[in-house]
């Protein structure tokens, strides 16, 4: 497979190929860290491609290992695709006590479980999934390396001129989802100290692919000639494949106290400019409402770029890919990101 990105991605097979293509840093990380791997929450939007990337990176070098994927797997097509790659899948609900009997204890763990949309209607589930489950995982895997997916939503909103929040900035979560995100990190920090666990915390803003993400949300609104709300006037995006590659690369740097890493693209995008680009592509007039806010949830991902390389897919290429996919009627998950939310109510 060529390492040069294509002009467009025309089908899901090619999309999956590009989503799971490991970076040099991801391959190098797995060469340094032996042992089997389990991905908890592997059936979500990012889990299948991260699990596939782990398999491909292992095949490219380093010690042999078995890769496990645990999830409810409500989509059996996703599970079957992983099985075909030689990954052992385990269907279970990790919030249930009886789930753990079938789940192996292995040296390397990626924790991708999370509950965000529905927080307003069932906040207790958000706390149970994001905080309580995280503590259970850390106790069970106290002798393992653990990479935990977190969120940049735990920071304050900042101006685009600031360059985005840095890893050592103070947390200031707004709303119960962001609070539980911080709670998740605090559990990892506490139990890391208790059991000397090597962990990495991945603060992500915002992973995108062609079936889901902020760019798809904006593209569909423009294509369907809906009015674009500019209240959240700026955004970070990063190709999901690059986000997963950085997370895998961080495994070798997991530490006690936990290693904290912002994962974000190098560009801070102006929502109005992105929509106008989509309008040009679709040959549609773009309609806007509201005033551009001065603040947004923005992460500074420079530390990750210096450690693991800049993202391989630029924001410019992502916009082109999403535009072509949308115009062609490509499959989507039909799950809006609600990235415009500022009050933390999801």
Image (cartoon, rainbow, N blue to C red):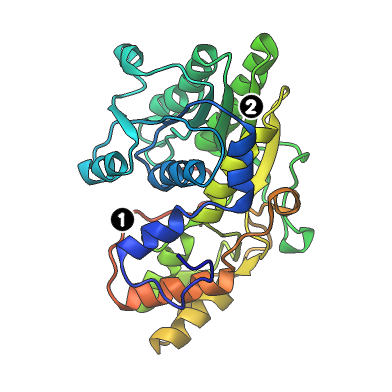
- The image shows residue 27 at horizontal and vertical percentages of 58, 45
Q: Residue furthest bottom?
A: 283
- Comparing 92 with 253, the one in front is 253
- The image shows residue 4 at horizontal and vertical percentages of 53, 71
Q: Residue 333, which numbered label?
A: 1
- The image shows residue 33 at horizontal and vertical percentages of 61, 31
- Comparing 195 with 227, the one in front is 195
- Residue at the spot x=66%, y=23% of the render? 198
Q: Note whether residue 202 is visible.
A: no
- Residue at the spot x=56%, y=54% of the render? 242
- Residue at the spot x=56%, y=63% of the render? 231
Q: Residue 44, which numbered label?
A: none
- Residue at the spot x=63%, y=26% of the render? 199
Q: Which quadrant holds residue 293?
A: bottom right
Local secondary structure at mark 2:
strand
Image-based side of 240 in relation to 41, left or right? right
Image-based side of 224 in relation to 322, left or right? left
Local secondary structure at mark 1:
loop
Q: Note whether residue 70 is visible.
A: yes
Image-based side of 266 in relation to 52, left or right? right
- Comparing 92 with 190, the one in front is 92
- Comparing 6 with 172, the one in front is 6
Q: Which quadrant holds residue 125?
A: top left
Q: Residue 199, which numbered label?
A: 2
């Amino acid at each position: 497979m060529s390492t040069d990105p294509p002009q467009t991605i025309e089908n899901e097979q090619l999309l999956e190929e590009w989503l799971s293509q490991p970076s040099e840093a991801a391959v190098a990380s797995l060469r340094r860290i032996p042992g089997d791997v389990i991905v908890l929450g592997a059936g979500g939007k990012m889990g299948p491609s991260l699990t596939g990337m782990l398999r491909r990176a292992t095949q490219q070098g380093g010690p042999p290992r078995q890769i496990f994927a645990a999830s409810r797997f409500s989509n059996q097509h996703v599970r079957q695709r992983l099985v075909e790659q030689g990954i052992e899948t385990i269907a279970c609900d990790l919030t249930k006590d009886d789930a753990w009997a079938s789940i192996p204890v292995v040296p390397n763990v990626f924790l991708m479980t999370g509950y965000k949309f529905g927080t307003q209607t069932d906040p207790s589930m958000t706390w149970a999934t994001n905080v309580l489950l995280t503590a259970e995982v850390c106790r069970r895997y106290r002798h393992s390396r653990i990479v935990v997916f977190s969120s940049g939503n735990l920071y304050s909103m900042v101006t685009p001129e600031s360059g985005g929040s840095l890893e050592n900035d103070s947390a200031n979560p707004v709303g119960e989802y962001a609070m539980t995100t911080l709670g998740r990190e605090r559990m990892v920090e506490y139990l890391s100290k208790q059991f000397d666990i090597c962990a990495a915390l991945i603060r992500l803003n915002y992973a995108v692919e062609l079936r889901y993400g902020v760019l798809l949300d904006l593209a569909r609104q423009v294509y369907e000639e809906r009015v674009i709300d500019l209240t959240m006037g700026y955004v970070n995006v990063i190709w999901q494949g690059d986000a997963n590659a950085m997370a895998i690369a961080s495994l070798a740097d997991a530490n006690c106290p936990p290693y904290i890493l912002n994962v974000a693209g190098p560009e801070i995008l102006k929502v109005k400019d992105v929509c106008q680009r989509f309008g040009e592509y679709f040959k549609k007039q773009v309609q806007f409402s509201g005033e551009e806010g001065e603040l947004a949830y923005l992460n500074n991902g420079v530390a990750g770029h210096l450690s693991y390389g800049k993202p391989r897919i630029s924001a410019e290429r992502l916009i082109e890919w999403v535009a072509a996919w949308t115009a062609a009627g490509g499959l989507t998950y039909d799950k809006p990101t609600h990235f415009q939310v500022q009050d933390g109510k999801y």
